[in-house]
Image: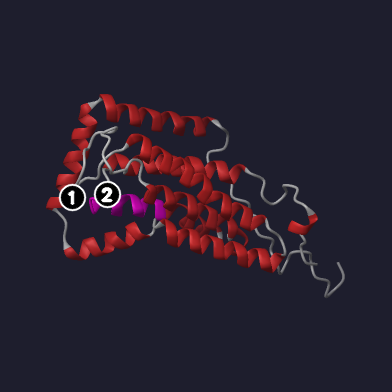
Amino acid sequence: MAAGTRRPGRHRPRPLGVPVLVPIPRGWWFDGLLVAAFAALTAALVWWSPLLRLDLAVRDWCDAHRSGPVSAMMKFFDYLGQGGALVTVTVLVSFWLAWRHRTARPVILAGLAPIISTLLIVGLKRWTSRGAPHHGSVRLFSHGVEEFYPSGHVSNAIVYYAVLAALLAPYLVVAVRRVVQWLPGGLTFIGTTYLGYHWLTDSLGGYLLGLLISRLLLRVPWRTMPLPRWLDRPSP
């Protein structure tokens, strides 16, 4: 290559480009396992009372060991899964990338994530109608006004940070990308359970579904899928 010649994409990495995030482990067997695990968890909450007693015991332990400084940190952990803020940040990042690279690919991913998450999580919450740790029933299908299973905060922290990691993958080193993708979900799980905002099994159910949704989103070949020319006009 002649001196001074710029390599294509060297200085302007394409969004959703190299390295592309892929589900780990690969293959569909793990997705099936996630579906089976969530179904088993839901069935156990209906027919296996020891799991309900575990939820009550975890809530009571957290209530008895809740301190001011730790609670402040846990509120921050819980806020990492705040849906409104995450959607806003994800959409803004996607529009910035779309404008910079003249392609709608980032916006399609960022727009699809909240649609799938909302339909699945809200639908399950309304169907299961479970109370919160400090008001309502611990049992599923209690037909109360509360709708807390599965945890939307935990699911959000899995899905949206995975989307952000995918959008920003070309700009982040591998270690940072993995932290962005995986750490917030675990922290939100701990925070929302410790504060008594969700039962332990709410958080577990939200984690399973969030992982499933993120894996499905990351399976789409966003970088290479065909789009109309007016939606994908990369600059030279």
Q: Which residue reaches farthest bottom?
A: 4
**Above or below 145: residue 14:** below
Q: How crowded is mark 2: few (under 14 residues within 10 Å), some or many (20 or more)?
A: many
| 25 sits to left or right of 231 | left
- Determine which residue is flagged by label 1: 62
Image position, residue 221 (x, y; %): 67, 46
Q: Residue 75 carries which label?
A: none
Residue at 42 percent of width and 53 percent of height: 157
| Mark 1 crowdedness (10 Å alpha carbons): few <14, some 14-19, many ≥20 | some
Horizontal and vertical percent position of residue 76: 32, 63
Q: Say which amino acid is labelled 1.
A: Cys
Q: In which quarter of the image is residue 167?
A: bottom right
Question: Residue 141: horizontal and vertical position, in percent?
Answer: 29, 32
Is residue 44 within the magenta segment?
A: no
Q: Which region shows up in magenta?
A: 184-197
Q: How far apart are marks 1 and 2 (CA)?
A: 8 Å
Quarter-wise, where is residue 83 in the image?
Answer: bottom left
Q: Quadrant of the C terminus?
A: bottom right
The residue depicted at 60 percent of the width and 61 percent of the height is 94
Q: Main secondary structure of the magenta part?
A: helix
Q: Can residue 218 be seen in this view?
A: yes
**Left or right, 181 with reference to 232:** left
Q: In this view, does 180 lie above or below 35?
A: below
The answer to which of marks 1 and 2 sits earlier in the sequence is 1
Q: Is mark 1 on a helix, strand or loop?
A: helix
Q: Are marks 1 and 2 in contact (CB under 8 Å)?
A: yes
The quadrant in which the N terminus is found is bottom right
Q: Name the residue under label 2.
A: 193
Question: Can you name the residue that lies furthest to the top here?
Answer: 47
Q: Position of residue 104 (x, y in %)?
A: 68, 58
